[in-house]
Structure formats: structure tokens, C-alpha cells
Amino acid sequence: MSSLLESLTVYIGMALASISQPTDIVFAGDAMQHSAQIDAARRNDGTYDYSECFNAVKDYVSDANYAVVNLETPLGGKPYSGYPCFCAPDSYAVALKDAGFDMFLTANNHTLDRRDRGLCRTIATLDSLEVDHIGTYYNDSCRSHIIPLIKDINGYKVGFLNYTYGTNGIQPGKDVKVDYIDTVLIGNDIAATRSAGAEIIVVAPHWGDEYKLLPNTSQKQLADFLVDRGVDIIMGGHPHVIQPMELNIDSTDTLKRSLVVYSLGNFISNMKTRDTRGGAMVKVTLKRNIEGKAYVADASYRLVFTLPASGGNNYRLINACDTIKDTGRQWEYHRTQFVKSAEAIFDRYNVNVSLDMYR
């Protein structure tokens, strides 16, 4: 009987593996909205048009089975504003959705820039767009109905969690809920997500030191905490610059893996220093072994670079490894400097995560 059960288990696993195709999830970094970006999107009729911002990455995002971006601005309604207290037009989120993003992370240090009202309006707007979102909630009751959040992505049950180190000193009101980094809360959420059936767990922490190209001690400690509790993918943001990526593979069990991306950097922004002009997008491939167990099979990255508005064009992303031919030599210089710096970090510190050779 035991032998029969074992054979049946293997057979079922082989069947699952055969019908479950590899699945890709794409992650993008901090989607910012500075005042200059809002001004560039404004049209004469009072609307805001972001339609051209993401054209160069739209295929990469849309071709994935699921795509996640950090929305680092409230959608709080007029008046719109940039740094230090952000508030973007709703059409910005529409453009991100149209680019192919399925989930918006909302737990970050700017989520309360328009206080409780802005947080609630952001949730309502994302709900109206019928996109997934996680990290902030109307209240504890709403959170309890959302968490655990498990998505069926092409047959893989993937759980998502999102936390922030803080909200720039602004405290939430008595009702609204922001998921702050708290190891007790996180540990309980991970356990609940796994118990609810998640095969893969993704945690997206908003953490670290701004403008630092290497993770600090607290990031490493929290990453170790998450990995020890079985988190499969850790996808970090906040520093506004890239930081190293590690796909750690257990030497005794090669299917026991954890991906740690300390910071994706900026997705799109008006930041102007060498390392803040762009960021990384990461594609994670999930597969099943012969027994049907899901695991992180591979991870790769692409670099993106933000071209500022000029000549009637809006701010727009480009693949950072592509030569700039149409906007002047100064941007080509900034692009090459950004790529050189980012690749120096990745070449030295990345583990089992390489450049996506899309060309």
C-alpha cells in the first residue's frame, strides 16, 4: 500500500508539472510623481496624460503573467503636488494599469502625504480601476478580509505582503490601517498566508537608507528573518537607487530557494543624481518540480532609465542599455553613467541574478 501511495504521489506530481507551465512575475520599483512630471502631463483642457511614459517597457510588463509596481504617491485628488508631500492625478494610475501592472503596492513612506483622506481615496481609485493593491486599508476589518492575499497566477498560488518602515512621521488616524514593519505582525501574516494555501510567498518591504547602493544591517536582518520563515521572494524598495540581488540556493536541496532584491530603485521619477535616474525591473520565473512543488526557478533584471520631458514629449522610460539617439548628448552621458554604476554593483554583489539579455 505504501508503495502504491508513493507511486500515485509521483504520478500526480508529474501530471501537475506537465500541465503547469513556467510563470513569470515582473516587479518594478518606485513609481514617483514629482511636480515636473505632473506639469509635463498637464494638457490644455485640464486633463493629465501619461500615455507615452511607459511605451518602451509595456511589452515586457504585459508579457508577464503578473506584474507589480510600487505606487509611491497617493491619489488624493486636487490640488496635485510633488515632493515633499506627493499627490498624483488618477490618470497616472490608469497609465500604469494600461502598461500592464496588475498589483500596486501602497505601503510606503508617502502613503499618508494626504493624510487619511488621501489614503482612502487611493484605495477607492484603485478599486475602481479593478487592480489588486496591498499595504494600506480602510480599517482593520477591511484588512482582515484581504489578508491573506493569494493570487492564482497561471496555476501557481502566490501570496503577497507589503510593509513600510514608516510614513515620514505622519500617523494614521484611528480607523485607517497602514502595514508597518513589525516582525510579530509579519510572522503572523506569513504563517496565515502559508496556511491559506500559498505555494510561493512574496514580501515587499519599504526599507533601507535612501541613496545607498548597499543594504544596511537592518535590511539584512529582516531579510534573514523572512527567509527563515519560508518567504520565497523579497522585493525591496525605498532607497531610490538599485541595491544587490541574491537568488540563494540551498546546497543540500537545490529547489529550496529564496530571492532577495534589496532595492529596485526608481521606476520613473524626476530625480537627477547619477544613481536615481533609473532603476531595475526584475522578472521572476516560477516552475514546478516532478512532484508538483512550486519554486523560484530563475530571476533576471533589466535596467530602465527616465528621460525627462523635452521637445513636447512627456517623461518616458527607456531600456537603459539602449543608446539614446533622439534627445541630445547630455542624456546619453547620464544614461551611460547610470548603467556603469548599476552594473558595477550588480557584477560585484549579485548572486545568481543576471541581466536579461533581451536583445
Image: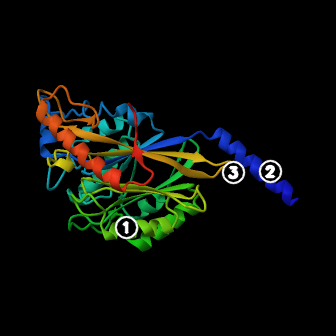
Q: Return the residue found at the far right.
A: 1
Q: Is residue 318 left or right of residue 221?
A: left
Q: Amino acid at mark 1?
A: Lys
Q: Amino acid at mark 3?
A: Glu
Q: How is the image coloured?
A: rainbow
The residue depicted at 47 percent of the width and 59 percent of the height is 147
* Residue 220's disc number: 1
- Which circle marks residue 291 in the picture? 3
Q: Compared with residue 245, is residue 219 higher up or lower down, i.e. above or below?
A: below
Placement of the N terminus among the 4 image quadrants: bottom right
Q: Under tag 1, what secondary structure?
A: helix
**Residue lying at 21% horizontally and 32% vertically, measured from the top left:** 49
* Callout 2 secondary element: helix
Neighbours of disc 2 within 10 Å: few (<14), some (14-19), many (20+): few
Give x and y (percent) for residue 68: 39, 46
Q: Residue furthest bottom?
A: 184
Closer to the chain start, of discs 2 and 3, is 2
User: Residue 75, can we see it?
Assistant: no
x%, y% of residue 143?
42, 61
**CA distance separating discs 2 and 3:** 10 Å
Q: Amino acid at mark 2?
A: Leu
| Position of residue 234 measured from the top left corner of the image (x, y, whole percent) | 42, 58
Would you say 11 lies left or right of 201 here?
Answer: right
Q: Position of residue 192 (x, y in %)?
A: 53, 65
Is residue 72 visible to us here? Answer: yes
Sequence-wise, the earlier of marks 1 and 3 is 1
- Disc 1/disc 3 C-alpha distance (Å): 32 Å
> Which of the marked residues, 1 or 2, is nearer the chain's N terminus?
2
Between residues 306 and 168, which one lies in front from this camera angle? 306
Q: Which residue is mark 2?
A: 8
> Callout 1 environment at 10 Å: few (<14), some (14 to 19), or many (20+)?
some
